[in-house]
Image (cartoon, helix red, strand yellow):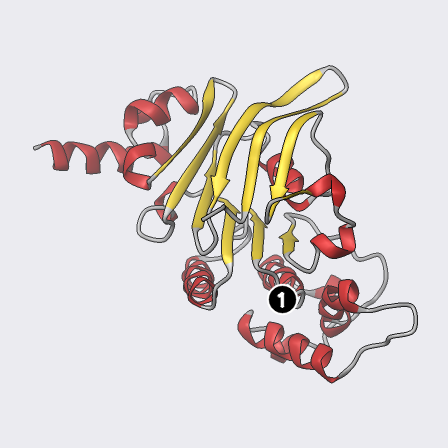
């Protein structure tokens, strides 16, 4: 069975600076994959390449057996939704008005919103637990509330592939748990999840696979047990694990299993 998304020897850079070098990996339909790596490694760039908002310098990004460069962005957006770290809303839009923008790929020049669009927006608001905020002004919300609205915006596209750039950013522990539960539910609904994650403790037990992106080493792909090893993380993050709070727990778990 062919993957939903495939990176085939993909390279990308800004000016003369290479960010992604010869990256190849498959993202199976129905998977839940965490993208990890140090800041500046290119995780956001990787997600934007997957969404088709950036085009690779060489190689191919393939969605359902078709290279993204052959597809119009509107068509890609009916399958892939990218939830960014930052969402700039220049006007005083309500939450509902922001989430309604997720229906744009389905609207034509002579076709305004229909009942199915309103139903999709209602469901997205409900899933992200922001129905009660729908008449609030987006720019007046807290960071955590904005994060949930951005996820609702992505869900309104009714995607098959949901890309999330640091989705737990600005969320307290309780909201992080709710977000992880939502990802489990979306996966059960047939949505493939690909999310950049900063907190490594959220990866094991919640993601079926891990993609490690680091300038210190080649792209690595495997299960959490295969990738989240102290020896690998130390090299990838260029930091002794016993001195890095994100890696201390991995050291302790690895030691217990070895004993």
In the shown orientation, is residue 237 left or right of residue 59? Answer: left
Instruction: Report the label total.
Output: 1
Query: Percent x, y for residue 75?
Result: 74, 56
Report if residue 243 is visible in the image. Answer: no
Give the x, y percent position of residue 138.
73, 65
Q: Residue furthest right?
A: 110
Of residue 222 and residue 143, the one placed in the foreground of this image is 222
**Residue at image x 74%, y 15%?**
16
Rendered location of residue 150, percent (x, y): 65, 60
In the rendered image, which residue does mark 1 sit on? 158
- The residue furthest bottom is 115
Nearer the observer, 21 or 40: 21
| Residue 84 at least partly seen | yes
The residue under the point 50% across, 55% down is 192
Q: Residue at x 65, y 76 (%)?
A: 120
Residue 257: percent from left, percent from top? 13, 37
Q: Which residue is at a point 7% across and 33% down the rendered structure image?
A: 259
Q: In the image, 234: left or right of 86?
A: left
Residue 26 vertical placement versus 168 (above, below):
above
Say which quarter of the image contains residue 113.
bottom right
Q: Secondary structure at mark 1?
A: loop
């Amino acid at each position: 069975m062919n993957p939903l998304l495939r990176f085939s020897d993909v390279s990308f850079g800004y000016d003369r600076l290479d960010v992604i070098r010869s990256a190849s990996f498959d993202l199976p339909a129905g998977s839940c994959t965490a993208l990890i790596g140090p800041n500046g490694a290119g995780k956001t760039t990787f997600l934007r390449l997957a969404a088709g908002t950036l085009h690779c310098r060489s190689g191919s990004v393939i969605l359902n057996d078709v290279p993204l460069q052959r597809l119009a962005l509107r068509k890609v957006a009916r399958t892939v939704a990218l939830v960014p770290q930052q969402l700039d809303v220049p006007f005083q839009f309500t939450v509902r008005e922001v989430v309604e923008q997720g229906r744009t790929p389905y609207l034509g020049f002579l076709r305004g919103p229909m009942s199915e669009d309103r139903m999709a927006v209602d469901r997205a608001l409900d899933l992200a637990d922001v129905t009660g905020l729908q008449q609030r002004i987006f720019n007046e919300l807290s960071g955590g509330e904005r994060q949930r609205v951005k996820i609702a915006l992505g869900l309104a596209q009714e995607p098959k592939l949901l890309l999330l750039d640091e989705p737990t950013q600005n969320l307290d522990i309780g909201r992080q748990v709710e977000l992880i539960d939502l990802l489990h539910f979306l996966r059960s609904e047939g949505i493939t999840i690909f999310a950049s994650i900063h907190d490594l403790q959220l990866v094991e037990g919640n993601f079926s696979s891990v993609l490690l992106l680091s300038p210190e080493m080649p792209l690595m792909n495997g299960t959490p047990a295969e990738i989240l090893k102290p020896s690998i993380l130390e090299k990838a993050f260029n930091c002794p694990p016993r001195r890095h709070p994100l890696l201390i727990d991995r050291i302790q778990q690895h030691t217990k299993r070895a004993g």
